[in-house]
Amino acid sequence: MATTTISKTLRIGMIGGGTVGGGVYELIMNRLGGATATITKICVRDLDKPRDFTVDTNVTSMVSDVHEILNDENIDCVVEVMGGTGLAKTVVLEALKKGKSVVTANKALIAEHLEEINKLSGSGANFCYEAAVCGGIPIINTLQTCYTGDIINEVMGICNGTTNYMLGKMEEGAEYDEVLKEAQDLGYAEADPTADVEGHDVRAKIAILAKLAFGQTVPVDTIPCSGITQISSVDFEYAKLLGCTIKLVGTAARLSEYGEHDGALSVYVTPKIVPMTHLLASARGSGNAVAVNSSNLGTASYTGPGAGRYPTASSVVADICRVADGSCSAPFPSVTSTSSIEIDNDYTSAFYIRISFQDGLGIIRSVGELAEAHGVSINSVLQNPIRNRMEADFVVTTESCKLSQVVSLCDDIAKQEYCRMPPLSMPILLDKDSEYSS
């Protein structure tokens, strides 16, 4: 990493002038007064498009060609807030090659090209990305600097505000399609919501957190990923009976083989049944929350706004200030204690399995026999009163078992004549006081 303090005002070229870019400009130019840093150029696709922030044309020029920033020797730092992994990749890599520090909020780019970025950063140029994960929560800098003498066992988090908002509304009784439209109308969800609702956004973020916590580069396309599209309001009814809620959670955790957290690393994204007593259950609306379990601290939690103009811009500006005063950390500090850790995503958990069925005799017995055949022990059976015998549901919860066992069990249940659709399964987040963790 570069450690030289920049004595002059940091001159910035910013790529992107949308919501976050506008927030960054306002914070840098208005609150910092241009003393620490100043934005001299902004590159946008359409120079004629109206902006929701005022550009001081005496200080800042608007351009439409990224090379006017990349080739400007007077620019010390490139701020990339355009998004995507095409042109943004070119901007970030070329800037680093030219010795310009880079600040970005682009989690997809980092997750997909992590090693390439890591190799280029540090030789005279800093690479900072606080805003890439959980918006306004300073989780990146925390993992870079605050766990140096510790051993992290697990990082898990609610890292997507859109889905957390949607799940909160479904908990109140709304159905998925209704909530998705509302989220789109409010601007939380894109017209194409796939990245959010299928968990792809969280997958990129947990890949980054896994690298920071465990020193392991986990290719994004190898991370098992389940979204929220199959969840119904009825799942919240059953979760409530368990004293729980449902959250979309990204997890990177050391499995236990011979002792506590001494086994392989498991990285995955899935909705989880979360006890209301767990800190992740407290993340409401579009908020985010991250829980880090480590040898020294036990479990520490970090909560706050996960998106939005000023929360995200605040993290970008914090990185800019670190570049300006020479206090940037290495983007991915070495974690020597886990340098050769194996990746194994067949994790162990208690599970929730919802089975949609046409009513008949012996259904619960059939499910029990199939569970036994797969070595899965049932903990409880939950069923609301049947209102329509052709479209009913019940839930079984399991004792701790492997994911692969539950997947095979659900595949076999789906083949039965009474089963109306593939069963929905979710891991149950174990709470130390829960009956599942005894």
Image (cartoon, grey):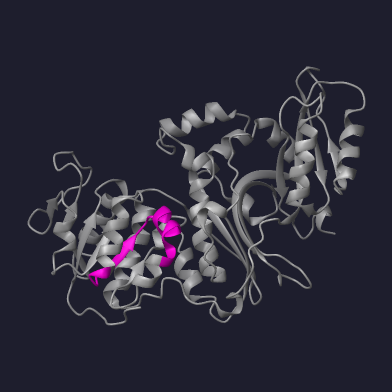
Quadrant of the image for the C terminus? bottom right
* Residue in the picture at 34% in, 72% down: 121
Quadrant of the image for the N terminus? bottom left
Q: Quadrant of residue 48?
A: top left
Q: Quadrant of residue 192?
A: top left
Residue 67, x across and y down, in percent: 16, 57
In-image side of 193 versus 419 (left or right): left
Residue 363, above or below 22? above
Residue 136 visible here: no
Write down the region rendered in magenta: 97-115
Residue 185, above or below 100? above
In-image side of 139 versus 437 (left or right): left
Residue 166 visible here: yes
Residue 268, above or below 216? above
In-image side of 276 versus 286 (left or right): right
* Residue in the picture at 58% in, 41% down: 227
Residue 413, x across and y down, in percent: 80, 34
* Residue in the picture at 38% in, 63% down: 129
Q: Is residue 86 magenta?
A: no
Q: Is residue 110 magenta?
A: yes
Residue 127, above or below 401? below
In-image side of 23 versus 219 (left or right): left
Foreground residue among 327 and 281: 327
Residue 130, x across and y down, in percent: 41, 63
Residue 279, x across and y down, in percent: 64, 56
